[in-house]
């Protein structure tokens, strides 16, 4: 089953963003994604929508950020106007070298993120989706051949999203009526939190392609216990292995890691909110069967959960509850495939990666591998 | 003397558009121009200006124009907003295949040009420049190796523009006080026109890099005589050789060519204005010493003149005179290096490519080759 740009483009334009005649569509994509961009443009033509290609090119952007005085950085008004005028924004990642910005000082990247924040806010008023073109740099990061990686992306993307939505809805139902969640995995993870009626979001590939997760926001002060993230966490170009956090009254009171523990400490030290959880997510996309060092895919992986320290996602927090606020949002993943369980109000809802409702007769369980 | 992206970028950002701190700069460039785009971004960083990269990517645009119903085409409002918000626009051409849009029907290209017209108008309110990155497709079109073509572009671009401006100003002075221009070359060209106080534009690389021409608008009804354009004219992907026009009362009354005479007829048949002249230009960039099938360069070539049938350029027409109006503007070139002269009010101002003021003592004549 080889990667199919036309299928990918059709999903983005039809399923994710439902492009209509007359829509003004921004395609933000790198040059390496030209085969997918071409397929998207073809589909936009069929729909009668007008495309505009923009990009934040990595080599030029590096050169720019190395020379500009950070005090001179300001929100790019021309880009802001594009975002405001767009009905639809299709964001395509993909790189021949994912380390192209790796030698920029952290403060330059932070200053750049800060001026771009209003653009992200403006984007929320449009229909948008984020996806990835399987380029050689992404394949290399995943330690895969480009061909094998393209097949991997195809399996993750080319799913029956209506069936996936229905599958995820069963978990959404149970989470919506639950007050507490407990996650147990191996010897080192036993963590509990309240979710008390926060919104449960069914991400079946509307904003992310691939989608395939259900997420919500923990009540910040309610988190108790320990967790060991046994999948690597990438931060500042470095890989944290087996990050361990211990929570009391919602706050991290101890932390450690087998490698790059100082990077973990630096993340947690960003601000007050960085020591509290902003997200609980449960990966349910079984087309994603391996870790590839790309959060768009990793957090959707079947048989995993992820927790994020830092900012909670606005639409997952009900008005009556406080969101967790922070400058960061860092997802970290726990493998749930063996010796593990998720409990809702004391009842097991998933054991060793299998949900209890998968054993019910009427459940159309997505295949584990395709 | 090899091509130097940094030097090219510096000329674009400093000389052509005088970028200032806080300027919102649009860089419209293809992926193949990344080395130049990177150098431009670096220079913008030094200046404290904010870049945004956009493009009209050829393969995706072809796919889009092949699928969209031309009735559904409309001015892209998001792109219009970018143009309005830009203080500076740097347009970079360059292609790995200049024929990428060659199999689109002429009516699709015309419909696409039409919806994009308001964008060009919006651009006039900014400081803008058009240039070219010497890519393999452009080199191939010029029948040159990419390396030799890069050196050619470097020679055309990397000039002493202050000296060039001064050199051109001498011709501007003479044209400003002239009422009639006569151009004689070989046996087949003897054409006369009034310019009667229309504006004489000294293009020393403000809007075009390379620059290097002086141009004005003939009084449309005044053109009399014959001209043979002995440099090839490209139109609709075809090459017209030795296009010949005969004028009476400003209008083409006879036309012919050695090859593709039907294409020439089609151009002249576009509308009423397509049978009249909109521009008289005199190429003065002696860094450009050969014809390369790219009008940005060809029309600036030393020892040539060009005439355009169709639309006159707004700023070359004085309010009291009528502009020539047309949907087209087609430049065509006459070699003036041998057996030729330009007369102003009966006085020779150029003979066999050499201006009379070059023989004066104080003239700093740009070198013919570098």
Image (cartoon, coloured by chain):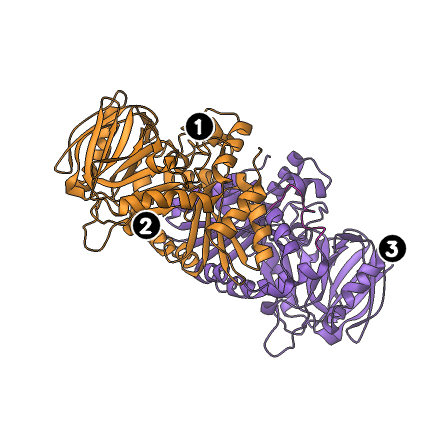
Chain colours: A orange, B purple
Q: Disc 3 to disc 2, how far (Cα)?
A: 61 Å
Per the image, the residue denoted by label 1 is A141
In the rendered structure, find residue A117 and report the number of the disc placed on it: 2
- Pick whichever, B145 or B119, lies toward us: B119
**Is label 3 in a helix, a strand or a loop?**
loop
- Pick whichever, A85 or B12, lies toward us: A85
Please provide percent x and percent y for residue B97: 67, 43
Please provide percent x and percent y for residue A248: 12, 34
Is B100 magenta? The answer is yes
Q: Which chain carries label 3?
A: B
For the N terminus of chain B, the quadrant is top right
Q: Give the range drawn in magenta.
A: B94-104
In the rendered structure, find residue B302 and report the number of the disc placed on it: none
Per the image, the residue denoted by label 3 is B258
Q: Mark 2 lies on which chain?
A: A
Q: Mark 1 lies on which chain?
A: A
- Tag 1: Cα neighbours inside 10 Å, few (<14), some, or many (≥20)? some
- Pick whichever, A163 or B23, lies toward us: A163
């Amino acid at each position: 089953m080889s990667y199919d740009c036309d299928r990918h483009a059709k999903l983005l334009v039809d399923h994710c963003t439902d492009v209509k005649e007359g829509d003004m569509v921004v395609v933000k994509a790198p040059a390496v994604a030209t085969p997918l961009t071409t397929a998207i443009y073809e589909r936009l033509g069929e729909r009668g929508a007008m495309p505009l290609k923009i990009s934040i090119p990595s080599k030029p952007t590096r050169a720019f950020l190395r020379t500009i005085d950070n005090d001179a950085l300001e929100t790019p008004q021309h880009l802001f106007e594009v975002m405001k005028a767009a009905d639809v924004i299709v964001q395509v990642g993909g790189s021949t070298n994912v380390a192209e910005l790796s030698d920029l000082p952290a403060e330059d990247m932070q200053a750049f993120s800060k001026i771009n924040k209003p653009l992200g806010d403006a984007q929320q008023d449009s229909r948008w989706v984020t996806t990835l073109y399987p380029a050689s740099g992404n394949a290399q990061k995943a330690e895969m051949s480009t061909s094998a990686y393209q097949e991997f992306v195809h399996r993750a993307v080319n799913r029956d999203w209506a069936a996936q939505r229905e599958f995820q809805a069963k978990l959404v139902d149970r989470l919506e009526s639950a007050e507490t969640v407990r996650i147990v995995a191996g010897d080192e993870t036993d963590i509990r939190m309240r979710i008390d009626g926060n919104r449960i979001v069914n991400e079946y590939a509307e904003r992310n392609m691939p989608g395939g997760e259900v997420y919500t926001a923990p009540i910040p002060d309610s988190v108790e216990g320990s967790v060991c993230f046994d999948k690597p966490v990438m931060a500042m170009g470095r890989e944290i292995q087996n990050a361990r956090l211990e929570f009391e009254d919602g706050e991290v009171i101890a932390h450690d890691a087998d490698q790059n523990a100082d990077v973990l400490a630096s993340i947690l030290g960003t601000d007050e909110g960085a020591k509290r959880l902003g997200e609980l997510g449960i990966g349910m996309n079984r087309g994603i069967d391996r870790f590839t060092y790309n959060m768009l895919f990793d957090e959707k992986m079947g048989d995993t959960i992820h927790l994020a320290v830092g900012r909670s996602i606005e639409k997952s927090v009900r008005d009556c509850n406080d969101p967790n606020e922070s400058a960061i949002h860092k997802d970290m993943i726990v493998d749930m495939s063996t010796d593990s369980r998720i409990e809702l109000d004391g009842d097991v809802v998933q054991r060793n990666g299998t949900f209890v409702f998968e054993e019910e007769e009427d459940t159309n369980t997505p295949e584990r591998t395709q």
